[in-house]
Structure formats: structure tokens, C-alpha cells
Image (cartoon, rainbow, N blue to C red):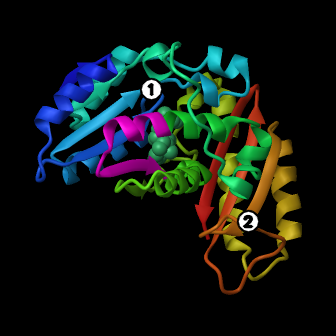
């Protein structure tokens, strides 16, 4: 496994190493890695001659400075996990590598209404930052395949739009969410929870299961209220509990009989914001 800090060195290396039958799989991360991340890396390693993982805590996608300041950093452990998962190349750039001070501001990609709902509404500017950093990475690396987690469902949709907007040949592969035994979606931010909070946070997944099991039996408005009450009972502050059409994230007032749907939940616990979703 080879580690790069400079974009230019990485580009020189890739230009030499890549050929038509040695294609590149890319896994962007913000570090503090867990098994959710390594499942993306393992899949890429199985499908591509070269697997590149980036570790970059992108400042422009944080709308809350405290969230950015306390985002966990575990670089040595991350590198050990990546080596074991089969990564070939790790890119750990400084902020100036991604946002060079002497360069014009990175052009903004507008994801339209998709960027205004759910996470876009709760975290103004978040998807603008995600699009900025992904644009930089995608144009630098031009990976054949890009691996992202279903846990960030809306982010996957926006990045897919960005790929089309940039007219790249990159194919996005969405990898199922890896969960703890009690259903909690693995997340770097889970490290910030105390042990009792960690146990209570499984209620997000309980909401998703309940939304799924009551499909076609109970009006969604009733289920939504039950879920919000459950979250509050456990000490979480719900941000949203929604269902949407899975292919375009159009929010639904009630269960659809025909469309594939996705249930999405976000809530805060002790200053930590948690999100999760389930295809139903
Ligand atoms: P992050 O480091 O949080 O930016 O995540 C990097 C990538 O890992 C994103 O594509 C996430 O969707 C994905 N990811 C994060 N948590 C999980 C999980 N529990 N299961 C699968 N993928 C995940």
C-alpha cells in the first residue's frame, strides 16, 4: 500500500500504473474508519486492479463548526485497516491540496430540489461542500468505479447527478449499510456517543423496521408520530422521519402501493447527529 499527500505525485503515479485492464476503484472517506468503510474497500479490491481510498475531513461540507472540530481522527489505525482490507493507494491530502489558496473558488454544482430536502434542509450548505470535494476528486482521479454507502442515500443520488453533470465515465456502486448487532448503522460519529447513548441510538433502526412492518397496515402519518415519540422517549431529538420514492427521493405523505420506497430517519443525541435509511 502506497500513501500520497500531494495530488500531483498521486496523478503521476496513476498515469504510470493505470492501463486499460488495470482500472481504478475509488472509495472516498473522512477517516475514523469502521467496517462500513472497509466493506466498500473490500468490494473495490475484489473488482478493480487498483483501489484508492482518500481520507480527507472536508471542511466545506460541515455546517456546524463544532461537528468539524470534534470529528474523530484515527489515521494510524485507519491505515492498518485499509492495508488489511486490500487498498493499494491511500490519498491523505492537506486542505491546501484540495482547495489551493491561489486557485479560483471551485465551481458550484447545484443539485436542484434534491439538495433542498432532508439532509439538505437540515444542514444548509452540506451538499454544496460534498459536491465541491467530489468534483475535485473525480476530476483528479477519473476512477472507473466509485464506491459509496447506502447509509448516505441522498449523498449517493447527488453524487450520481454530479457524475452525469461532469460527463464522466465513472460508475457509482452503492454498497449496503453495515450495522452493529442491534441494528445501529456504523458511523464514525458513533465514537462520540457514551455507552448508554450508544444503546439508545439503536432506536433509529427500530423506527425504520417499524415503518417497514406497518406498510399497507397503518397510515404513515400515524407511524411517523409513533417513531417521533419513540425517539423522544429514548432521549433523541428527531430531525425527520420520512418516506420517499426510492428512485428520486420525492417525499410521500403515505405509503405508495406501487413505487419502491425508502424510509429515512435523522435524529440528534447528546450533540451527535445520526442518520439512517432502509429500502422498504
Ligand atoms: P464518511 O467517512 O462518513 O464520509 O463515509 C465514507 C463512505 O463510507 C461513504 O460513502 C459512506 O456512505 C460509507 N459508509 C459510512 N458508513 C457506512 C456503513 N455503516 N455501511 C456502509 N457504508 C458506509
At label 2, counting other C-alpha atoms closer than 10 Å, the crowd grade (few under 14, some 14-19, many 20 or more) is many
Residue 145 on the magenta span:
yes
Is 275 situated above or below 271? Answer: below
Q: CA distance from mark 1 to mark 2?
A: 30 Å
Q: Residue furthest bottom?
A: 258
At label 1, counting other C-alpha atoms closer than 10 Å, the crowd grade (few under 14, some 14-19, many 20 or more) is many
Image quadrant of residue 262?
bottom right
Question: How many marks do you count on the picture?
Answer: 2
Q: Secondary structure at mark 1?
A: loop
Magenta-drawn segment: 135-149
Residue 99 on the magenta span:
no
Quadrant where the N terminus sits is top left
Q: Position of residue 79 (x, y in %)?
A: 30, 22
Is 235 situated above or below 72? Answer: below
Residue drawn at (56%, 40%), measured in percent from left and top?
A: 131
In the image: residue 31, left or right of residue 61: left
Task: State yes or no: discs 1 and 2 in contact (Cβ < 8 Å).
Answer: no
Residue drawn at (47%, 14%), measured in percent from left and top?
A: 96
Q: Which residue is mark 1?
A: 31
If you read the primary sequence from the N terminus, does the residue marked by circle 1 or circle 2 appear first? 1
- Specify whether tag 1 is near ligand 1 (CB below 8 Å): yes
Q: Position of residue 271 (x, y in %)?
A: 75, 25
In the image: residue 47, left or right of residue 113: left
| Residue 56 is at least partly visible in this image | yes
Q: Position of residue 230 (x, y in %)?
A: 82, 51
Residue drawn at (54%, 19%), measured in percent from left and top?
A: 72
Residue 243, disc: 2
Q: Secondary structure at mark 2?
A: strand
Residue drawn at (34%, 15%), measured in percent from left and top?
A: 76
Residue 113, disc: none
| Residue 183 is at least partly visible in this image | no
Amino acid at each position: 500500500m502506497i500513501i500520497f499527500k500531494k495530488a500531483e505525485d498521486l496523478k503521476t503515479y496513476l498515469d504510470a500504473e493505470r492501463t486499460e485492464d488495470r482500472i481504478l476503484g475509488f472509495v472516498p472517506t473522512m477517516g475514523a474508519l469502521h467496517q462500513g468503510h472497509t466493506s466498500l474497500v473490500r468490494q473495490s479490491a475484489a473488482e478493480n486492479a487498483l483501489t484508492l481510498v482518500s481520507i480527507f475531513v472536508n471542511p466545506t461540507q460541515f455546517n456546524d463548526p463544532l461537528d468539524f472540530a470534534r470529528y474523530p481522527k484515527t489515521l494510524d489505525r485507519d491505515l492498518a485497516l485499509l492495508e488489511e482490507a486490500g487498498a493499494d493507494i491511500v490519498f491523505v491530502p492537506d486542505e491546501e491540496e484540495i482547495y489551493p489558496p491561489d486557485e479560483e473558488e471551485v465551481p458550484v454544482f447545484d443539485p436542484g430540489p434534491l439538495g433542498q430536502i432532508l439532509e439538505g434542509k437540515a444542514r444548509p450548505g452540506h451538499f454544496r461542500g460534498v459536491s465541491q470535494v467530489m468534483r475535485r476528486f473525480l476530476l483528479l482521479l477519473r476512477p472507473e468505479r466509485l464506491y459509496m454507502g447506502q447509509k448516505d442515500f441522498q449523498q449517493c443520488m447527488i453524487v450520481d447527478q454530479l457524475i452525469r453533470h461532469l460527463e464522466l465515465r465513472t460508475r457509482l456502486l452503492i454498497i449496503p449499510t453495515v450495522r452493529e448487532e442491534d441494528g445501529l448503522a456504523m458511523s464514525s460519529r458513533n465514537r462520540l456517543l457514551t455507552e448508554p447513548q450508544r444503546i439508545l441510538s439503536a432506536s433509529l433502526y427500530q423506527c425504520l423496521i417499524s415503518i417497514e412492518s406497518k406498510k399497507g397496515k397503518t397510515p404513515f402519518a400515524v407511524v411517523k408520530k409513533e417513531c417521533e415519540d419513540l425517539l423522544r422517549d429514548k432521549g433523541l431529538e428527531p430531525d425527520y422521519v420520512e418516506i420517499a420514492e426510492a428512485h428520486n427521493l420525492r417525499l410521500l405523505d403515505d405509503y405508495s402501493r406501487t413505487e419502491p420506497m425508502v424510509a429515512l430517519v435523522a435524529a440528534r443525541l447528546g450533540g451527535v447527529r445520526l442518520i439512517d435509511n432502509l429500502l422498504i
